Amino acid sequence: MMKRRVAILISGRGSNMAALIRAASSADFPAEISLVISNKADALGLERAKASGVNTLVIESKPFGKDRAGFEKVLQAALDEHGIELICLGGFMRLFTAEFTKAWYGRMLNIHPSLLPSFPGLDPHGQALRAGVKLSGATVHFVIPETDAGPIVMQGAVPVSDHDTGDTLSERILEVEHRIYPEALRLLATGKVRIEGDVCKTDGSGPSENFLIAPVVG
């Protein structure tokens, strides 16, 4: 099986990166994590990646300031050098130009801790709690120039408790993130997802009898 070569871009601890690396360590996983790139030299995820035997690279974004195109030129050269076919963003705290996202359209995934299109941007857990929603979750989507938008590949939901704080909700959603991100990458790497207009379709998917209701009062 020819495995797709994947780069993960991080800026911090690399929690989702670690979940992707674990999944890719399985012999039957259709992708390999070939490179982890951080725009911050002190990102904790770099050591986690090295400990897993994954190549790492630091491309400091600070010297580029607002010159996104300059940063992306160096980034693209590194991706080309390593033969990268797919990109997964894992807490990568730098915006891309429209040109870069369009060049990688359909090949670059991001994960966001809300059920998009609800609660994009900063503090999605706080947004969910302030809105009083009973369900929240995580979304894996293709990256487009707009932040936390793009065709949705996969979502996972969790109940929201009246006693939740931003931290407790974040912890619960993080477990979902670690489950759906590897599965979304598996679908992409095996060619089972396709984009029709602004919507992502999945080959072989069908209706599910599973459902989640909240709150549950017993």
Image (cartoon, rainbow, N blue to C red):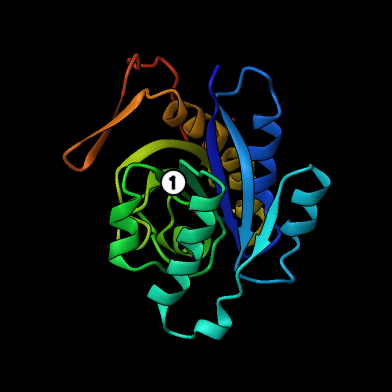
Q: In the figure, is residue 172 to the left or right of 217? A: right
Q: Residue at x 53, y 47 (%)?
A: 160
Q: Of helix, strand and loop, which one carries label 1?
A: strand
Q: Quadrant of the N terminus?
A: top right
Label 1 environment density (alpha carbons within 10 Å; few <14, some 14–19, many ≥20):
many
Q: Residue at x 63, y 48 (%)?
A: 35
| Quarter holding residue 188 | top left
Q: What percent of the width, then of the height, locates residue 133?
A: 42, 51
Q: What percent of the width, then of the height, locates residue 30?
A: 55, 24
Q: What percent of the width, then of the height, locates residue 143?
A: 36, 52
In this figure, which residue is indicated by the disc labeled 1?
109
Q: Is residue 85 visible?
A: yes
Q: What percent of the width, then of the height, locates residue 218?
A: 59, 30
Given the current orientation, which residue lies at the most extreme left position?
197
Q: In the figure, is residue 176 to the left or right of 68? A: right
Q: Residue at x 74, y 49 (%)?
A: 49
Q: Residue at x 46, y 29 (%)?
A: 189
Amino acid carrying mark 1 in the image: Leu
Foreground residue, 23 or 58?
58
